[in-house]
Image (spheres, rainbow, N blue to C red):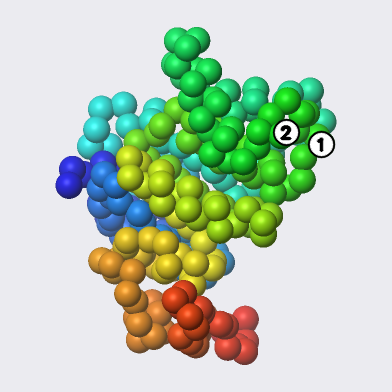
Amino acid sequence: MNKLLEIRNLDAAYGGKKILKDVSLDVYEQDFLGIIGPNGGGKTTLLKLILGLMKPVSGKITYCKEGLLKKIGYLPQINLLDRGFPIIVSEVIESGLISKEKHFRKEKLEKVITQMGLEEVASKPIGELSGGQLQRVLLGRAIVDEPELLILDEPNSYVDKRFESRFYEILKEINHQTAIILVSHDVGTVISLVKNIACVDETLHYHAGSDVDQHWLDEHYACPFELIAHGEVPHRILKNHDSSE
């Protein structure tokens, strides 16, 4: 498998406070990497570095395919889209297209609208959407140009429950052609979806494969978890603990 991204010995800081220390990571074509870790551990900072939205204090990020930085789809944790802006659903999704060919633009747009289950609201202003519908629109914008790498920061935060299972199916479909980096606090969901896992808590601990056990979680994740088998999907439940520790 060809390498898309190579991160070596990365340090990052905000206001002089170190957030990431000596982080190294490789991402490959068709990879599906789940990133977990405690709040404030540096997960979103790592994404910003990969996206070129901030610069590291030291270390290096190498994009192994030409033009990769322009071929990354991104769904941020917090959407800052002005819901009062006079724009309709299809126009928001179409804004993610770079191709100028009218035929291909229409074909890609219609495919994603159907994929996201947004046919009935495609012509509606975004101000009339629910939070879950809007999140689907923004995911559609992120994938409509068929990116080489898709980065999702807590994507299930606003996905409505009726669409949640379909949302995860879509991610698996996308992964046949696109590498995915998924950041989530929902460890059970991450483990059921991804191929590999990294825990970020200032440093990064990589686990090839998604079959992590209780010992690995306890060792690398700042918050204690209890591992419980439940049906086909493993669940992680937080024990009571002092958040000040």
> Label 1 to label 2, Cα distance in Å?
9 Å
Amino acid type, label 1? Glu
The quadrant of the image that shows the C terminus is: bottom right
Residue 47 seen in the figure:
no
Residue furthest out toward the left: 1
**Residue that carries the numbered disc 2 in the rendered image:** 121
**Residue that carries the numbered disc 1 in the rendered image:** 128
Percent coordinates x, y for residue 10 in the rendering? 32, 53
Percent coordinates x, y for residue 27 in the rendering? 28, 50
Up the image or down, 145 lies above or below 34; here it is above
Up the image or down, 238 lies above or below 13; here it is below
Amino acid type, label 2? Val
Q: Mark 2 or mark 1, which is nearer the start of the sequence? A: 2
Which residue is rendered at x = 41% and y = 51% of the image?
Answer: 172
Residue 235 seen in the figure:
yes
**Label placed on residue 236:** none
- Whether the residues at callouts 1 and 2 have beta carbons within 8 Å, the answer is yes
Q: Toward the viewer: 202 or 63?
A: 63
Picture mark count: 2
Percent coordinates x, y for residue 161 in the rendering? 67, 59
SS class of the residue under badge 1? Answer: helix
